[in-house]
Image (spheres, rainbow, N blue to C red):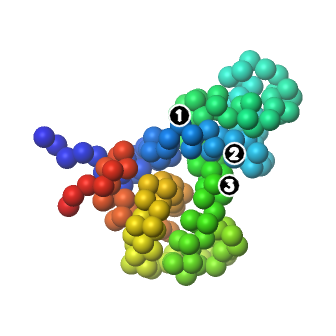
Amino acid sequence: MADATRLKDAVEDRGPYAVWELMTDEERRAAAAAAWVGAEGEGKTLLQMTMAKELKFRPQTVRRLPADKVAGRLAHIAKNLPEDALFQLLFHFHLAERRKLLGEFLDAVGLPHEEGILDLPEDAEPPEASKVKEAAEVLVKAHGRDAVIYLATLAVADGAFWGGVDEVLAGFDASGEPVAG
């Protein structure tokens, strides 16, 4: 029997879609609501246009809908969204629901942030992979699956910058369960 796909490989192959599959229905709805409220610019426009098409509403009508009215539907169709739109849902989910976890990780890595939001110049050098790996392992021990979802999101965002995360993700299968060896 062939080895199960590792989460590291699933994220490399399928990007944010692999992360989305790790999440519960409740987390997906929370992600959709967070993005509906928090997205700006092109990201917000893309979500609004997608929902207008899905609901067969005029775009100006959809813009006024509250997050609780669209979250379930948006979460349901998210697996069919373009990759960058789905990533927006993941990004806003972590900012809205897991900020403390983000802060813990960035503190452990030694990166400056404001309440979990990185404060780095564009040309910042990535942190040491060994430091990232160590911080990621501690985070997983403290927060379990929530941390695995966050780390997989970081790998999607910029796997090269977050060197060391991939080694931790290699310890999980594509469904987020730990694997031996």
Q: Is residue 161 left or right of residue 181?
A: right
Residue 144 at x, y percent in the picture: 43, 59
Which disc number belongs to residue 174?
A: none
Near mark 3 (Cα within 10 A), the count class, few <14, some 14-19 or many ≥20, is some
Q: In this view, does 17 lie to the left or right of 3?
A: right
Looking at the rendered image, the quarter that the C terminus falls into is bottom left
Tell me where residue 131 sits by quadrant.
Answer: bottom left
- CA gap between label 1 and label 3 equals 20 Å
Report the residue marked by disc 3: 96
Please tell me whether mark 1 sits on a helix, a strand or a loop.
helix
- CA gap between label 3 and label 2 equals 9 Å
Give me the residue at 82% from left, 22% from top.
58
Q: Is residue 179 left or right of residue 78?
A: left
Report the residue marked by disc 1: 79
The amino acid type found where label 1 is placed reads Lys
Q: Quick one: label 2 or label 1, which is nearer the N terminus? A: 2
Residue 33 at x, y percent in the picture: 69, 41
Closest to the observer: 35 or 84?
A: 35
Please tell me whether mark 2 sits on a helix, a strand or a loop.
helix
Q: Is residue 20 left or right of residue 100?
A: left
Residue 72, placed above or below residue 180: above
Residue 75 at x, y percent in the picture: 60, 34
Report the residue marked by disc 2: 35
